[in-house]
Amino acid sequence: MGEVRTSNDRPVLRFGVGIAGKIANGWVLFVVTLAQVIRTLIRRHGAALKPVSRDPFALILYEQVAYLAPEARRRAAFRQLEREVGVTAEAIVSAPRRKLEAIARAGGAIAPELRATRMRTSAEMVIGTWDGDLRTALAQPLPKARATLAAFPMIGKPGADRILAITGAHAVFGLDSNALRVLCRIGWGKETTQYAATYRSVQEAVTRELPTKPAKLAEYSAVLQRHGQELCRRTAPKCSECAVVSLCRFGRSAAPANRPRA
């Protein structure tokens, strides 16, 4: 059975001599590719869910309407907001505060009042700066478009990049904490005590393997996010159920109870 090592911040499978492949110091090396991981995860979990919208402000609301909630609950809360209030800046500003708070509460019990306030604040930002239509901001060069989106509450740079890819505005690879954890555990980049440094390390490690189209980048991100939410959890990961454990540095070193059965 092989083992997973990291070479140049990329995962590499290492086998004993006797298997066809590139030999290095008595070992046969196979580089694990990002495309290989994505294909395997799609076979395990199914295709990535379609985005709830391609409108940038609606996607900001999608992030704010729920917090630390399963994807199904987040989607349900967003659809409730879409149905009962609307997902335009004007609709959010006009909505009763109690209505926003009730919908935010449907997206999770953590700070629903604060999240309702952030939705209203975001709507006021769009109306005040972008005349109610945030889509015009996406036409800016990437650094400015990213900075514009990152300034909204609960978005930040990773969220901004995910929105830019989903809307098709820019070809960028945004990772939420779940997707980042999956890639780091498999062997891309280096985990540090600083989230920003870990994020940068993983991004640099995968950049040569990324597709060029925004829609494909958004799909990769969504597939990795789902795997991180459902199996590759921060605590109590379900390595025994993981389809890529044989390619994963973390999975190979997991406790025996978490390893896949023979």
Image: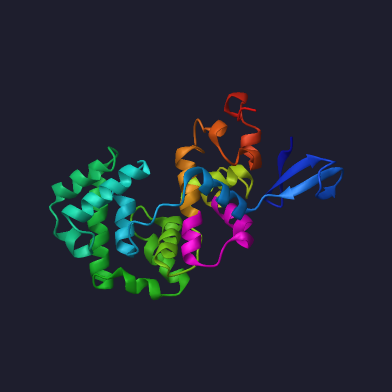
State the residue in front, 117 or 4: 4
- The quadrant of the rendering that contains the C terminus is top right
- On screen, 158 above or below 234? below
- On screen, 199 above or below 17? below
State the residue in front, 179 or 140: 179
Q: Residue furthest top?
A: 257
State the residue in front, 83 or 176: 83
- Quick check: 175 left or right of 121? right
Q: Residue 42: where, in percent of width, then height?
A: 51, 49
Q: Residue at x 35, y 64 (%)?
A: 54
- Answer with the quarter of the image where residue 261 lies: top right
The kind of secondary structure the magenta stretch mainly shows is helix
* Magenta stretch contains residue 202: yes
Q: Residue at x 42, y 56 (%)?
A: 159
* Magenta stretch contains residue 104: no
- On screen, 211 above or below 237? below
Q: Residue 38: where, in percent of width, then height?
A: 56, 51
Q: Residue furthest right?
A: 26
Specify the segment rendered in magenta. Answer: 199-220
Which of the colour schemes (rainbow, by chain, secondary structure, one colour) is used?
rainbow
Q: Residue at x 57, y 40 (%)?
A: 243
Tell me if residue 198 can be seen. Answer: yes
Task: Count the labels in the image.
Answer: 0
Q: Residue 155: where, in percent of width, then height?
A: 38, 55
- Quick check: 256 left or right of 174? right
- Quick check: 107 left or right of 138? left
